[in-house]
Amino acid sequence: MPRPGPVLVLNAGSSSLKYAIIDPGSGDRTLTGLAERLGTTDAVMTLSVEGHDVESPELVHGTHHEAVSAVLEAARDLSESLRPVGVGHRIVHGGGRFTESVLVTESVEAAIRSLSALAPLHNPPALEGIDAVRALWPELSQVAVFDSAFHHTMPARAYRYAVPHEWYTGLAVRRYGFHGTSVRYVSERASSLLGRPPEDLALVVAHLGNGCSATAVLGGRSVDTTMGLTPLEGLVMGSRSGDVDPGLFGYLARRASMSGEEVLEALNARSGLLALSRIGNDMREIQAAADGGDREAALAVDVFVYRLAKAVAALVVAMGRLDALVFTGGIGEHSGPVRAGVVDSLGFLGLRLDDAANAADGRDTGGRIDGGGTPAVLVVATDEERMIAQDTIRLVGDA
């Protein structure tokens, strides 16, 4: 049986660290917080214990290691029953090796490090967190939960690129997919809300936040998704372009003397909604500007919705049918206009909205915003941290 007790979940971004001590069963949070602008001298962090803000530690060096150390010190000050019995780390890229969550060992850590070339902004900070926990609280078991793991069930026709064979065999160039922990949680919740077992369902889960992806989930398994080798492929996102013609790299090299790294930086950090709207990457601000008559903001919303609707329709091909479209993530859970635009574009699939339920984000209808139609349309709040905590307590117990 798994050991009872809370779990510290660490979610390291390229310049941020989100953390929480979670009860895996209830999902209740004892300690929560966020460190931002890591890697700079302006790094800051917040800390809340049992719902009350506490004095935030000062970050002198602004590293992920320092931020994790501060979280561990705060956790040690909790009463014994609230201290974590294990640590779960969100790892963005597990490559083709990791198809499920695993206990962190020396060999696992080395493998995560070897995959850093595929996720240079995310895997290294996560490794800093692992190192910090080992240095300061070595008796805590650590678990790696991979964003890409859920998508290992994709068939070759979905994950292979039509590129030279040696790129695939020697350099592992293929589609991997991301947001898998979120999609796994949301698809399980959707199954419960619909009162049908996962193996009977064909879902498209649209995870829409600053990063965006859509996944075809058939029988509880991922069969296709929009992200690829990296989280840059697919939908329009907050500051990421999503799909572009790869010929763009050669064109910009010739016309603007841009290197591949410079183009990648622009596609990751200066594109997407940010570029289209010229306002920012926050859909709430963009939608407000569009409602006020800003043409570029309106175009940004239109492009976002169109590309998403097109992707959803394509993902239905992977399953042969659609039982429910599920929206999650910050935009998916809170933007009625985006959901309405997508569903209106997909009327040919039989999708319909209940306008009142959609306006209320499904709060009064158990997440259903279709008015009881078929296919169903759901809004489901994601909880990646709770899923990470559940995987961690299971593996810590097995150990």
Image (cartoon, grey):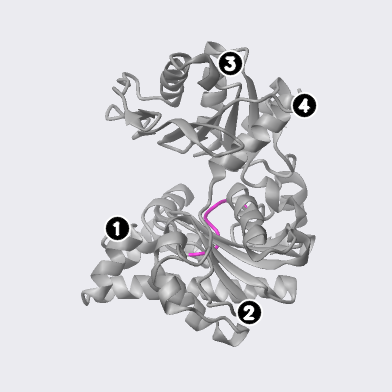
In this rendering, the label closer to the viewer, 3 or 2:
2
| Disc assigned to residue 134 | 3
Mark in front: 1 vs 4: 4
Residue 162 shows in this picture: no
> In the depicted view, which residue is nearer to us: 116 or 359?
359
Marker disc for residue 374: 2
Estimate the spatial distance between the alpha carbons at disc 3 and disc 2, rounded to whole Å. Answer: 50 Å
The percent coordinates of residue 124 (x first, y second) are 53, 31
Query: Quick one: quadrant of the C terminus?
Result: top right
Callout 4: 10 Å neighbours few (<14), some, many (20+)?
A: few
State the residue lying farthest toward the bottom.
348
Residue 398 circle label: 4
> Residue 41: x, y in percent?
28, 26
Question: Of callouts 2 and 4, which one flags the residue occurring earlier in the amino acid sequence?
Answer: 2
Q: Residue at x 40, y 36 (%)?
A: 15
Tag in front: 2 or 4 = 2
